[in-house]
Amino acid sequence: MRGVLDAAPARVCVIGRDRRYLYVNREFCEFAGRGAAEILGMTTLQLIGPDLVAKLDPIAERALAGEVVRSEGWVDYQRNGRRYIAYNFAPFGEPGRRADAFINSMRDLTDIKLREEEAAAQREQLQAILGGIADGVNVVSPDARLVLCNRGFLQMYGFPDHLGAPGTPLADFVRNRLRRGEFYAHEESGRPVEELVSRRIAEIMTAPVGRFEEMRPDGRCIEVRRERLPDGTRVNTYIDITARRDAERARRAGRDALRRNERLSAIASMLAGVAHEINNPLAVVAAQSLLLAEEAEGTPFAERAEKVRAAAERCGRIVASLLASARRKPARRDPVDLVQATEMGLDLTLEPVRAAGIALEVDLARDLPPLLGDSDQIAHLVGNLVGNARAALAAAQTAGRIVVSLQRDGSSAVLRVADNGPGVPAALRERVFDPFFTTKPDGEGTGVGLALCRTIAKAHGGSIVVEETEGGGATFVVRLPLPH
């Protein structure tokens, strides 16, 4: 037994009722710095001093009374200084008889305790640092449990404080989010909750390291940075970059608006030049058409001559309107019969459409009230859209069809020009209205027509968009507000 106790990695001693040492092992002697022969027969008061005796005597009395007592804590030794000791006091003697001694085994846990306290202090320091960071931070163990997180993470994702306790399963966070009705775009709300939870946990634990952007269900944009430690622990940081992205979009929108204004200024200058050059020969055409109409009066050619005269006058008004737009003059605001203006626009393109073998269907509501605007501009818009549809159908392999409809929809008049051509890809449905943007081959389009259509629609308080025609093709939809 002595050999076993001398080899034990603990300090062992047997102390009698009179507090004298009856046995000490090798570890005890080394700690005390004395030999066994010197220690045996000494009292505890002589060896460890009055302060420590006063602290341990109550425990010794309990052991002498037959109780096994375990205790641990910091102890101040006269020779060895402050140590953290785990004590085990037990009665020593024959079973069933009053103990005349007790055995005390001691384990020195100072190094372990110091490391624990250091780790605890570091955790507290880390928590204090993380608590002062507005961005979100969390650390996740390889078994998908929370090691720690800061308040910024909980607040960013709307989680309650109790979920921030170390050891919380990640599944609890996912369930909390789903209970609030927040689903990511790829999550089907009708699926079983636990199925969604398990899929989300798998996504989190297998996600690659690096920096990523995540769109929250509430529309916010979160930048997530993931790192993986050698033991599989994951460190994640979260930064709300919604404001940054909004600012970037605003800057891009500002630059785009500036470019559009520059292009529109270029268009205005170009139109002013073109209109000026056209105006002179057009004046001759208008004058000659008037003379032709007077001379043809009463003849079979009278109706055709009148159409030429009316078309020449309409061209003159269009040129004047273009010049007014280029010079930033106030637009005309006269009562406009939308049906009549639409028919005028159709007259401009009717012959080219028929010549191309394209079927033209027209459905115009006759009960629309007049609106204030420029009838020539409306006609120009209609002619432009029909001409655009005709150009789109030029390369179509099937029989071309253009449908023009004008209907009332609440407080708006809705003009639709639909074709069964190749259509406009979704990615280009906004860009086709940009000045000088065209999908036509080189030499066949200027990119000005649809930009002018949008300008005319906006000048009348309306809008224009392009949609997909049912069955294939493109439908341009113009909405113009009607007067109350």
Image (cartoon, rainbow, N blue to C red):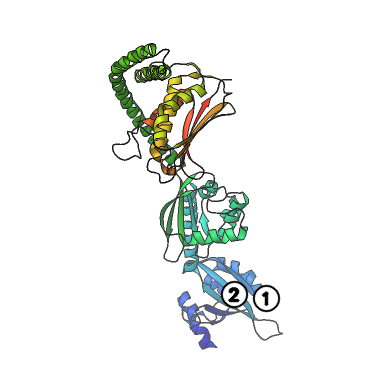
Q: Nearer the viewer, residue 136 or 470?
A: 470
Neighbours of disc 2 within 10 Å: few (<14), some (14-19), many (20+): some
For this view, does 469 lie left or right of residue 55?
left
Disc 1 to disc 2, how far (Cα)? 11 Å
Up-down relation of residue 461 to residue 37 (above or below):
above
Quarter holding the N terminus is bottom right
For this view, does 4 lie left or right of residue 395?
right
Quarter holding the C terminus is top right
Q: Nearer the viewer, residue 307 or 277?
A: 307
Residue 120 visible, this orientation: no
Residue 198 visible, this orientation: yes
Callout 1, which amino acid? Answer: Glu
x and y, in percent, of residue 439 in the image = 35, 40
Q: Label 2: which residue?
A: 88
Farthest residue, direction right:
96
Q: Nearer the viewer, residue 107 or 426?
A: 426
Q: Label 1: which residue?
A: 67
Q: Earlier in the sequence, mark 1 or mark 2?
A: 1
Figure label count: 2
x and y, in percent, of residue 98 in the image = 70, 82
Up-down relation of residue 54 to residue 153 (above or below):
below
Give the residue at x 32% y 28%. Answer: 262
Callout 2, which amino acid? Answer: Asn
Up-down relation of residue 120 to residue 41 (above or below):
above
Residue 255 figure quarter:
top left
Q: Which mark is residue 30?
A: none
x and y, in percent, of residue 171 in the image = 58, 59
Give the residue at x 43% y 56%. Answer: 226
Helix, strand or loop at mark 2: strand
x and y, in percent, of residue 348 in the image = 41, 26
